[in-house]
Image: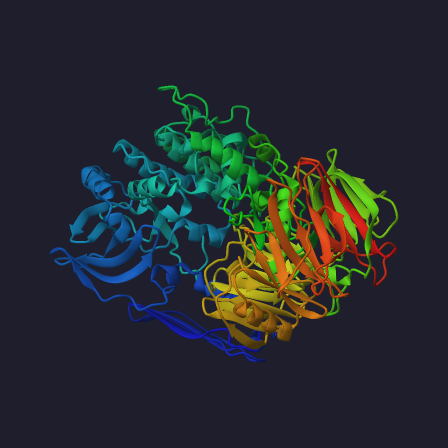
Amino acid sequence: MLSSRPVISQSIHTSGSEVVICLLTGSTLVGLIGLQVGGLIANAVRFTASAWQGRPARASIAIRSLWNLPSFKRHGALMTTQSPASRHLGSSYIMESRIGAGAQGEVWRGRRTDSREVLAFKVLRADLVENPDVVDRFIKERSTLLRVRSPYVVAIRDVVIEGSTFAIVMDYVNGGDLRDLLRARGSLPPAQVASLGTRIAQGLSSVHRAGVVHRDIKPANVLLSSRPSRGGDPAETVATGVAPGWGMPEAVVPRLADFGVARICDTFSASHLTGVIGTPLYMAPEILSMQAPTSAADIYSLGIMLYEMSCGTAPFVGEPAQLLSQHARRDAGRPDGLPDVLWELIASMMAKQPDMRPAIELVAQRLEVMQSALAGVPAAPRLASPPQSTASVVPYDWDAPSPADAATAPTVLSGLTQATVTASAIPTLVSGQSVNVPGGLGQASAVGGAQAGAGAPVPMTTSMPGGYAANTAGTTPPASFFPQTGPQGTGYTPADAAAFAPRRPRRRWWIAAAAVVTVLAVVGTGWWYFFSGPSVDNTWPAALPEGNRVQEDQRYTEVDDPYLSADGSRLLYSNMSKVHLFDLTRKGTSKVWSGECDEARFWAGTSLLCSSTSGQATLVSDSGKTSKAPFPEGSTFLGATTDVAVISSGEGTASDGPLIAYDAAGKEKWRAGGHYEKGRVRNGFVLAYESKSKQIQVLSAKDGAVLMSETGDRPNFDSDTQLPGGVNIQTGPEAFSRITTSGATIYDADGSETGTVSGSFTEKHQWAASVPLDALALKEAYTSLAKASSSTTPVIGPRGTINVSIDVKACTAKVGDKKLALPEPAKGEQCVIKPIGGLRDGQLLMQVGKQGYISDETGALVVAVSPDSGKIGWKTQGTYVATVPPLGGGSSGARLMLGQGGTYNYDLVVSSVTSR
């Protein structure tokens, strides 16, 4: 669905090529795309929305399809700036036009001054050139790189250093790369896999004979030439089988690129940026070990690539940490339709132990021999996700001594497996609402005391509700199901991940919960985010009734990984290897449903999304009825409202795809075409990033309409930030905002800009609101914040805004000159004061202290205090978690949910505010 604002209105020019795109909004969508190469028009399309069955989205898909053609990418049509003018390189070369850019620098097309033969020039980044180690290594290895010669290798012709310019002169290859072919074909017939594989293996053999380990074998580094090498045999070519119109030659010669270059540059990057060398999808497990990898690492990567060529997907998919685990500990599943002879070779190449893999010469020989036997065998079905892997009989052990010197893996490896892999392999799933305290951006209002030292605020991780021990919908990465995005953690926890890393250790829940109160500062309590109107429903603190005491209604013991449904009426948590569902509106604590789920989160409304380690995902209704999850394998779960659950539908090796919303029964409600991967769902808004257009977008969770679309860098949805891309969708269903360096822009629920507020706004200093904010109230909140000092928190409630000043050193809070009579911390106890919001009777709801070990400590308390008299109206022990509906349901009488208990084993207590 197009918004009322222009979608695209620009011209993009590059040297030697031109792309013009013009899209008009409204009922008519007109586009003209032209690519000029060498004076010829390669592609030109003109269309209207009516030609696409009245669906402009289909036209945009056509644009993206043309945009992805190899001819567009090869000739620099994706660049948005004018290519620099041609320039000389030394006395022998002319670089005529820039045709691309990558991790190591720019790529130019040019020639020798005395020849018309087209050459490619890789001009290294300035920081690489400035590093003497990189330059010295290139000089030392120059002769080695130059002597690699094969019709199946992109030859390095020269290495030129001129002043601050460092360039590598290479063959120019004009037919795209293997990645383009796989996108066009999906899976290739076995004979074609063998034919292409033979040539790639022969090229790799020549690289190995020169003593070079490539380290980055992948489809993008196999370029496709439309003609044989100089003086080469036409038999070098392999038919692509791609239909005309895809911008790809009918026959190509595969040529291995970037050997040695990536290795030297990435070694510099790894040593300076703690990175790793290679691409995780194709990376041999030993790449991360202390020892220098051998040529066997390239054979493993080639085996992965042959697997992908055979069935359309890599054998292991997911986030980097998950991939490393699978490469080391899982054996790939065999795709259906793959002939024995080809499968056996590929499987041997993917052996976990380097010394168990065949030599590259044997690989080339076996592939060449099997070509005739495989002739006529159809391609295996293209898979959206790989077959189920199995535990490896002989896994790779990073900590095992090497055969050569028995050196152990570096210490950092242990840290990686424990921290990185564990966190991503079994992360928190995002649900409609989780059980953490309400949230926003958070302000360290007052965290100090003897332990803090000099009264300095102690950093605390902010969390949005969505999980009690910092497992919240606001701060955790999007959940994903099935191998494609399993590491994002949505319920799919592959067995290899469980073997590779222990289950996520329970955090000290009271630390997380206390920190979570900080979140209140920005959006007002953010866990209430899914409701249908602007009224204050039972998930907002302002809905708590007036009273002078707190009475316990329900206690849930030994809680692990809890979540609330979007309307706050259902509680889900794990205990004793099972998942339990409770109805908070019923008296008592009897279970509504209990079952076996490796991970579970709330789907739309009060239904559940349950998955097992086998990768199967199931929907469970409130009555316990089960059905198969509707989304395709490789999808990522972003979040849910009371009406819909939203996923991004990646397929195969793709990590992104359209956004799809389903209702509680699994019926598709809407679809937004594009390339989306991760995001967040709050208050009826979907915050996501469209990677092709590089747009940060806010969409309506109701119908998928794009409400805001701004150019920007990809937000980090996996971090603890409450404002990915600077966008705040946590202030209620009536408005959202975006923070920039100059201030905040306010949008209403329809996506119309309603105003801006100048100022410097950060996650460390925000307001605390207990009510939803419409566009006007949101603008006023930003205005109040812009005027407030760093020690002042505007507290927003039903009766307006009250500024609370917090003195960290004295551990006190004041409203004007009136000191609030908050409980004081015991000697040596840390000071914590966090405003939560305003109550309907005018009192302020505050979190004071944190959970302690010693009986005479004040501990964590939730306090209602009068801003006028400074006196406490009521208080109760525990850490604020959420506000939930009353017993029996109903529209009034919201209750408190608090966390109580020890360091790791804790209880969730639901209490009512009453009068004596």
Give percent across and percent down for residue 103: 35, 51
Q: Residue 51 falls in which quadrant of the image? A: bottom right
Viewer-side residue, 820 vs 285: 820
Give percent across and percent down for residue 533: 74, 69
Instruction: Please name the residue shown 54% across and 31% down the image.
Output: 331
Instruction: Please name the residue shown 35% across and 53% down the image.
Output: 102
Give percent across and percent down for residue 214: 33, 38
* Left or right side of 81 for 524: right
Viewer-side residue, 708 vs 93: 708
Give percent across and percent down for residue 704: 63, 66
Instruction: Please name the residue shown 22% across and 39% down the image.
Output: 137
Q: Is residue 570 above or below residue 814?
A: above
Placement of the N terminus among the 4 image quadrants = bottom right
Asked whether the viewer can see residue 881, the reply is yes
Q: Is residue 248 above or below residue 338?
A: below
* Left or right side of 653 for 226: left
Q: How many numbered tags mark residues here?
A: 0
Placement of the C terminus among the 4 image quadrants = bottom right
Viewer-side residue, 272 vs 815: 815
Asked whether the viewer can see residue 602, the reply is no
* Left or right side of 53 for 39: left
* Left or right side of 446 for 131: left
